[in-house]
Image (cartoon, rainbow, N blue to C red):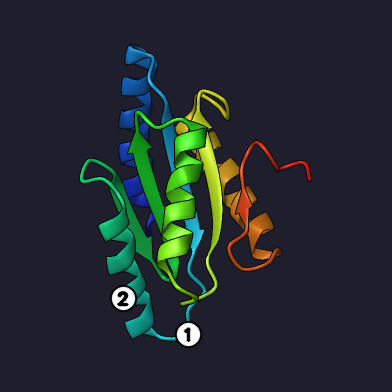
Amino acid sequence: MDILNPLITILEYELRCSIRYRRYLSLVMMDLSVDSVKREEDMRLNIVSQIRECDQFFAEDGMVAILMSETDPCCALNVVDRLSNSMNGNGEPRFAIVSYPSDGYQAENLLKIAHRRLDRARLLERGAVVSSNNEGM
């Protein structure tokens, strides 16, 4: 199953709610870059233990997406810091952050931006984070 199918559906719904109620919405995408299925599963379990129960978690083939309602870009960066610190050197994670309203109002555009940022993060060192704050760097 493609990670984008359920993600886009839930992202569209959460985005409509965020627009309606004037709330922030953030999406963190993460490339795990691990060398074994067992290690990837361990990292997924670790990630789930680090996020709120209300956050939406998606994972497939070394890529993870975390959709966080009522989370501004600064708080999303705090989540990324917590995730990065909890990995203790396991894998080579890279991160991308997109947020509503600062990065856009349409689900498909937010996903495109997230993928572009994740591609950029993959070219950087372990633990790299690309968001609207440092995309032009």
Front in this rendered view, residue 79 or 13: 79
Is the residue 75 above or below the residue 50 in the image? above
Numbered disc 2: secondary structure: helix
Q: Which mark is residue 42?
A: 2
Which amino acid type corresponds to the residue marked 2 in the rendered image? Answer: Asp
Determine the residue positioned at 32% across, 84% down. 38
Which amino acid type corresponds to the residue marked 1 in the rendered image? Answer: Asp
Q: How many marks?
A: 2
Determine the residue positioned at 30% across, 50% down. 51
Mark nearest the camera among 1 and 2 is 2
The x, y position of residue 9, in whole percent, is 32, 39
Counting other residues with Cα less than 10 Å from the Cα at mark 2, is it few (<14), some (14-19), or many (20 or more)? few
Determine the residue positioned at 34% across, 13% down. 20
The x, y position of residue 21, in whole percent, is 32, 14
Front in this rendered view, residue 133 or 25: 133
- Kindly indicate the quadrant of the structure image that contains residue 135: top right
Is the residue 36 above or below the residue 128 in the image? below
Determine the residue positioned at 33% across, 55% down. 58
Front in this rendered view, residue 4 or 45: 45
Is the residue 126 above or below the residue 39 in the image? above
The quadrant of the picture occupied by the N terminus is bottom left
Counting other residues with Cα less than 10 Å from the Cα at mark 1, is it few (<14), some (14-19), or many (20 or more)? few
The x, y position of residue 53, in whole percent, is 20, 46
Q: Is residue 132 left or right of residue 72?
A: right
Front in this rendered view, residue 128 or 118: 128
The x, y position of residue 92, in whole percent, is 55, 73
- Kindly indicate the quadrant of the structure image that contains residue 64: bottom left
Q: CA distance from mark 1 to mark 2?
A: 12 Å
- Report the residue marked by disc 1: 35
